[in-house]
Amino acid sequence: MKVNGTSYNCPTQDFGVVEQNQISFLAEMYVVQNGIGYLFNHWDDGNTSSYRTVNPTVHKTYTAYYVGKADNAYRGLSINSSDPTGTPVRLTWNQHPNTNITKYEIWRKVGFNITAIGYKIATINRSSASTYTYTDNEYSISHVINKDNEVSYDVKAYYSVENTLSQDDYVVTYGTPEAKRKFGFGSYCNGKSC
C-alpha cells in the first residue's frame, strides 16, 4: 500500500495523520505471495477504486480486500507441437508450489484463439509429481498452419482457499480432430469404405 506516495507493508500504522489534513492511499492492484496472485477487489466500505483520498476526523482502519488466484509464472505449459503429424496432443506442465492448489483443470479452444470459446475437458488432482502430463486423444498434431486448425489449451490451477481458477493463459498448437482423421474421405472403417 502507498500512503501519501510512500510504500508500506500492510498492516501498518507507521505514518502520522493530522486530523482534517487530506491523506491519500493506494492499494497495490496486483501482488504475488507464495505463488498466489492477489488482485485488488474493494475496500471495506465497498469502494472499488484502489486510490482513495480522505480527510480523517476519527480513528478509522481502511482494509483492502483482494481475490487470490494461482499465478501462472510457475506453470511452464508445453505442447508436443513438433511431434509427427497424427500424434495425439500431449500437454506437460509443472506442479504449482502452493499446496492449496489441489487440482488442475484442462481447457481447450478449437478454432481461432481470439474468438473461440474454451471448455473444460478434464480435471487432474494434485499428486506428489513435480510435473504432469495430459494426452488429448480427441486431437492429433497437424502441421497445416491456419485458423481452422488452431487448437488452444490452458491448464488452470484451482486455488482451494478461495475456490478460484488461475487466469486464462492459452497456448496455441495446430491439430486435427481424431474423427476427421479416422473417418474422413478416403478412410476405411472396419474394413469398409466410409
Image (cartoon, rainbow, N blue to C red):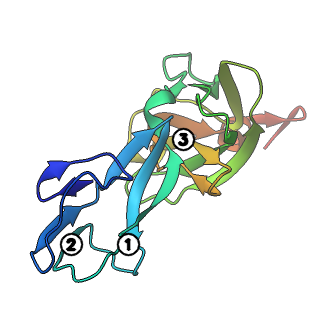
Dot 2 surroundings within 10 Å: few (below 14), some, or many (20 or more)?
some
Callouts 2 and 1 close, C-beta under 8 Å: yes
Question: Which residue is found at the position 58% from the left and 52% from the top?
Answer: 165
Circle 1 is placed at which residue position?
43
Q: Would residue 139 be seen by someone viewing this image from the given angle?
A: yes
Dot 3 surroundings within 10 Å: few (below 14), some, or many (20 or more)?
many
Viewer-proximal residue among 12 and 67: 12
Q: Which residue lies furthest to the right in this view?
A: 190
How far across and down, in percent of the image, does residue 57 sit? Answer: 22, 83
Q: Would residue 112 be seen by someone viewing this image from the given angle?
A: no
On residue 52, which mark appears? Answer: 2
Q: Which amino acid does label 3 sit on?
A: Tyr
How far across and down, in percent of the image, does residue 103 sit? Answer: 71, 41
Mark 1 and mark 3 lie on one chain; the one further toward the N terminus is: 1
Q: Quadrant of residue 46?
A: bottom left
- Disc 2 to disc 1, C-alpha distance: 10 Å
Viewer-proximal residue among 96 and 82: 96
Q: What residue type is labelled 1?
A: Trp
Circle 3 is placed at which residue position?
153
